[in-house]
Amino acid sequence: MLQAKVSYAYLLPANEYWRIKMALATGYGNQSLNTISLLYGDQITATGFSGLPTQDNRLIGQSIDYLDLATGILAYNEYAWIGASVFHLSEPRRDFLGSEFRVFRRYSGHLGIKIPLNEAETHFISTAAVYRLQNDIHLLDAGIFYEIPVWQAGVWYRNVPIQTKGSQINFQTAFKHQGLKFSYSYGMAIGALRGFGGTHEVGISFAIQKEAREYRWSYVQLSLF
């Protein structure tokens, strides 16, 4: 499998407080079906592989190329954000053996708000939600977080029951110091998935700190409604 993608984003200042970011992604993919190492039914015996050539009709190796397009828009300011994305715009064909399978378009909507709890704006409560739709599958994730300059913690509910019975609650926490971030999350399955155990995830990231530069915007008033 070979995949390559190029993305372009454009930032547009809508007014003094809001920004609008639009993006387009173009991807190319290639998938190959290698039939050289396949084992056929008449090559398998009670003791294993017979070593004899198959008498069945051999599958012919295939290769497919596809173009995958995606786009999105995000409006945000210091305390809130809302956006939408569409993936697989071209509904690329990704199949072998003449099945004519195509990837359905996937729609995503996301929003959130960050609420300061003190006048110095060093303590925040944030809440966010992500909704996804692909074919007849509807999924909703939602969460709430508490954050101070050096630490954050929260709960993320994955697959809020709309259609599915399998959900998961993720408990997340992270410590931050001068660009270094250490995070840990534990996912607990509930509903139909209960009994499958939990998942642990540990992450470490580092961002180089740079002094913020002052930009001068030339504002353009947009009529959004």
Image: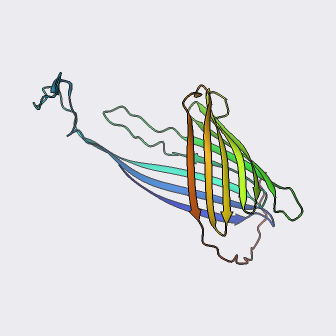
Give residue 197's position: percent from left, percent from top: 55, 33
Position of 2 with respect to 186 (left or right) is left
Residue at horizontal 16 percent and vertical 27 percent from the top: 43
**Residue sitting at x 75%, y 73%:** 218
Q: Is residue 192 left or right of residue 117?
A: left
With respect to residue 131, does 219 lie above or below?
below
Give how far across and how far down residue 31 sits, in percent.
Answer: 34, 46
Residue occupying the far left of the picture: 52
- Taking depth in this image into account, of 138 and 207 the one nearest to the observer is 207
Q: Is residue 129 visible?
A: no
Give the colouring mode of the picture. rainbow
Q: Note whether 43 is above or below 68 in the view shown.
A: above
Left or right: where 45 falls relative to 171: left
Which residue is drawn at the image coordinates 80% and 56% (left, top)? 124
Label total for image = 0
Task: Report x, y in % for residue 56.
Answer: 16, 26
For the residue pair 163 and 83, the one nearer the viewer reads as: 163
Residue 110 in sight here: yes
